[in-house]
Amino acid sequence: MSLLKTDDLNDSDRHEPKAFHSLKATVENCHWGYFSATKSPAITIKSGDIVHAEAITHHAGDAPELMMDESLKALWKGIPEDDRNPGVHLMTGPIFVEGAQPGDMLEVRYLAMKPRFSYGSNLAANWGHLYKEFGEKERVTIYRLDMASMQAHGHYAYDFKGKYEVPGTVTECPECAKEKTLNGVRVPVRPHLGTAGVAPDVSGRVSTIPPGKHGGNIDNWRIGAGATMYYPVQVEGGLFSIGDPHVSQGDGEISGTAIEASLDVTMQIILRKDFVFPSPLLETPDYFIVHGFDEDLNVAMKNASLDMLTLLNEHRGLSRDDAYSLMSICSDFTVTQVVDTVQGVHAKVPRSVFNSGEPDSE
């Protein structure tokens, strides 16, 4: 079925909040490094319910004196290192949505994202794009967040000794050599989720590192407050989880990480049975955005192109020929990230081009 051909995919009047849920980041409510179709739900909700959830960065140990409190220390202690696999991200959930079945869509409206602490970490990692160019050195930069101005600035930096490989590494930086960093530089704070998605319909654990049709580690900084994501449901209940919270990231995420910082996330989750889409679809106030993934960047680009063609043809009512022309003249195709095993490309089309004037006269 097709989306309504109006300027909005959303229909607020049909989805008044039914109930509010609090989802704390506890050992019972978290899982580290994976999605799973057999993971027991942390909570069960109805379509339209609002969830306030704690999303915790797995990089809190880069500056534990600034980015961890007692509850996070308990979380680190409660999930052993040998249970943090095969990926690296600390996930909160899963959330079971009553009535959700394979073939449905979960509409997740991200209403608010608030940093838990006033600090975040960026790691120039061994999986970063220029790791070898820096002599295979890894470096941590700690940023301080000013939420009044919505800016971040460098607090201090240090070289990480060894190789950053254990999920949830605690670097013991109080004993390291700290350096001043980025004097006079300010960057915009844009809180968003690097990783969020439903459970794939496969047996066993699925790594949180590569993104895919289930969502996962998309690393698109536009997935923040005011945005809506649509995730294709693959197993009963959806089993939706969030993690890998960020406060700033550029397209590409070239060093391997963003400014990684824990967030309190408020979201409304709505079950949609009136349309389908082949991949995670993002709606912001200004754009419709589709995502393509593959180990080959050219294939990721083609996948994004084909899904944008689907969006314009099946859900906005354009012929395939017209959609192809429109894609070339006003859609922007951008590398989302190059550091998550598979490459990511996102394509955006302005919402303003639709229903923005009278039909052309002959």
Image (spheres, rainbow, N blue to C red):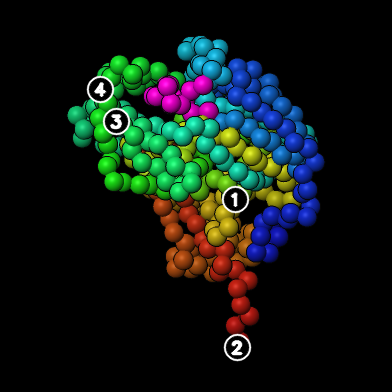
Q: Amino acid at mark 3?
A: Ala
User: If you read the primary sequence from the N terminus, does the residue marked by circle 4 or circle 2 appear first?
Assistant: 4
Question: Which residue sits at x=43%, y=21%?
Answer: 64
Residue 259: x percent and y percent? 41, 37
Q: Amino acid at mark 4?
A: Ala
Q: Secondary structure at mark 2?
A: loop
The disc at residue 209 is none
Q: Quadrant of residue 121?
A: top left
Q: Earlier in the sequence, mark 2 or mark 3?
A: 3
Residue 338: x percent and y percent?
A: 37, 40
Quadrant holding the N terminus: bottom right
Name which residue lies at 41% across and 52% down: 334
Mark 4 → mark 2, Cα distance in angstroms: 72 Å
The quadrant in which the C terminus is found is bottom right
| Number of other residues with Cα within 10 Å of mark 1, as a class: few under 14, some 14 to 19, many 20 or more | some
Q: Nearer the viewer, mark 2 or mark 3?
A: 3
Q: Which residue is mark 2?
A: 362
Q: For marks 1 and 3, give the one nearer the viewer.
A: 3
The disc at residue 157 is 3
- Residue 226, which numbered label? 1
Q: How far is disc 3 from disc 4 in space, using C-alphas?
A: 8 Å
Instruction: Bin the neighbour count of mark 4 within 10 Å (Cα to Cα): few under 14, some 14-19, many 20 and up.
Output: few
Instruction: Residue type at mark 1: give it.
Output: Gly
The mark found on residue 177 in the picture is 4
Q: Is residue 68 magenta?
A: yes
Q: Helix or strand or loop: what does disc 4 sit on?
A: loop
CA distance for labels 1 and 3: 32 Å
